[in-house]
Image: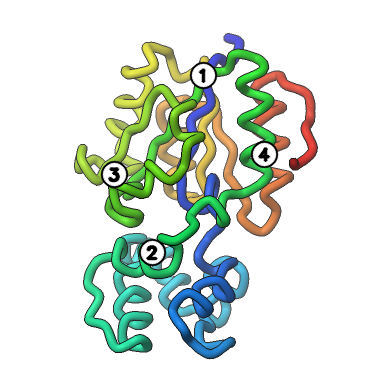
Amino acid sequence: MTAQALILDFGGVVSRTLFETHDLTEAALGLPTGSLTWQGPFAPDSDTPWRAMQADEMTERNYWGQRTREVGQLVGEDWTEMSQFVRAARGADPDAVIRPEFRACIAACKGADIRLAILSNELDLFYGADFREKLPFLKDFEVIVDATYTGILKPDARAYEAVLEELALPASACVFVDDQLRNIKGADAIGLPRVHFDVTSPATSYQEALGLLGLPERTTT
């Protein structure tokens, strides 16, 4: 079946990861350059909690909970919610951390009448509900399924089924993009065509998604 919709994870896929924006975070929080050293997928050997998360020894939420507390301590705050960290680090200009490759891909999809959806485990939990108002492009997404509210986390099959139900499309008519392997395995389990997004090579991953959608390659803008 011809692909009719693109379903994206948000953090890491649409937005640059917090690993990639340590310089912006340090500037926003008034921290000395080099204060934040954890690098996740960019230097996994030096990030023990990241490796534990990848091995399913801790959840993604627990990983970011740990980092939130650590950064809070650096700035003298008792942060317990990821949204506190993200608001302080990115709240002034969240648009600055949106991937240009994402913008190019969305332009291609809109030009080809490909429908757009987001399937996130923690969009509003991590970013805060008012974050969406600062990102006008989200109006192009007709479906946003966020486990902040549903309580159903990827890779639970019900998470994927929820977004497919709202789109009123079968899995075979969609392409799903996510940076976490466990979520890719969840997509595979229900026969949902997918791209395992490589945060170290976003352009390559978006080109792969465009290929599955039957669209020509696009350069970033």
Q: Position of residue 23 (x, y in %)?
A: 58, 75
Residue shown at 27% from the left, 42% from the top: 147
| On-image quarter of the C terminus | top right
Residue shown at 70% from the left, 53% from the top: 201
The 10 Å Cα crowd at callout 3, few under 14, some 14 to 19, many 20 or more, is some
Residue 165 appears left or right of 193: left
Which residue matches tag 3? 153
- Residue 121 against residue 34 in the figure, above or below: above
Which residue matches tag 1? 115
> Which mark identifies residue 86?
2
- Residue 18 against residue 197 in the figure, above or below: below
Which residue matches tag 4? 206
Residue 51 appears left or right of 108: left
- Residue 67 against residue 214 in the figure, above or below: below
Q: Position of residue 209 (x, y in %)?
A: 65, 32
- Going by the numbered disc 2, the residue's amino acid type is Val
Splitting the image into 4 quarters, where does residue 2 fall? top right
Answer whether labels 3 and 2 touch (C-beta < 8 Å). Answer: no
Nearer to us of marks 3 and 2 is 2
